Image (cartoon, rainbow, N blue to C red):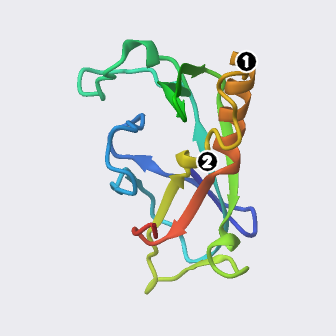
Amino acid sequence: LTLHSCAGAERKDVEMYWGALPEDLNLQDLETHPMGGVLLSSGDWCGVTVHYGPFMPGGSDDYKMPNPDAIGTTLFLHGLATKGEETVPFDVSISQPLDVLIPLTDIASGVPLSVTDQNDPDLTISKAYDKLFQGVDFTTASQEELDDVSFSALQDYTYVTLGTVIAP
């Protein structure tokens, strides 16, 4: 994650407390966890870039990937899509990195995020995985279509929220 000042003079990378940490969709939806932090200078901040990239474990204290097939991927999904009586297995495995720039003006009614000595805001980055395959017919979709839809959805449905609570 990188935050961008409105003047463009400053960029601050968020220090990830545990290094690269993949998400596990088996966790409770809408649960938030502090994963990193950065001390911002006073001023207006206009954007945050979310850097999606392949997970590569490093040291012995790193997160242990439960599925070794997911190592080296940016997005890895293995599941079943059910519609009516029909169930279709599917897999998505994308290793291409992706940067998503999110305007911080989207969370503050069109104004930048203001940071002062008295104001130390928390931000939550989230994705709407429930929209990942919106409109996809798994019975006819090719692997390429599933990969493309998934990759585009990361860009389209990555959000920033002011605070640490996500409204359902």
Is 122 on the left-hand or right-hand side of 133? left
Which residue lies at the image location 68% right of the left edge and 58% below the top edge?
102
Is 122 on the left-hand or right-hand side of 59? right
Is 73 on the left-hand or right-hand side of 136? left
Residue identified by numbered label 2:
131
Residue 150, percent from left and from top: 65, 34
Residue 6, percent from left and from top: 73, 69
Mark 1: secondary structure: loop
Determine which quarter of the picture holds residue 168. Answer: bottom left
Q: Nearer the viewer, residue 99 or 153?
A: 153
Q: Which kind of residue does numbered mark 1 sit on?
A: Ser
Residue 141, percent from left and from top: 72, 23
Q: Nearer the viewer, residue 147 or 18?
A: 147
Q: Closer to the N terminus: mark 2 or mark 1? A: 2
Q: Is residue 43 above or below residue 161?
A: below
Residue identified by numbered label 1:
142
Residue farthest along the front direction in this orientation: 85
Q: Which kind of residue does numbered mark 2 sit on?
A: Lys
Residue farthest along the left direction in this orientation: 61
Which residue lies at the image location 36% right of the left edge and 18% below the top edge?
67
**Dot 1: within a 10 Å radius of its alpha carbon, few (fewer than 14), some, or many (20 or more) residues?**
few
Mark 2: secondary structure: helix
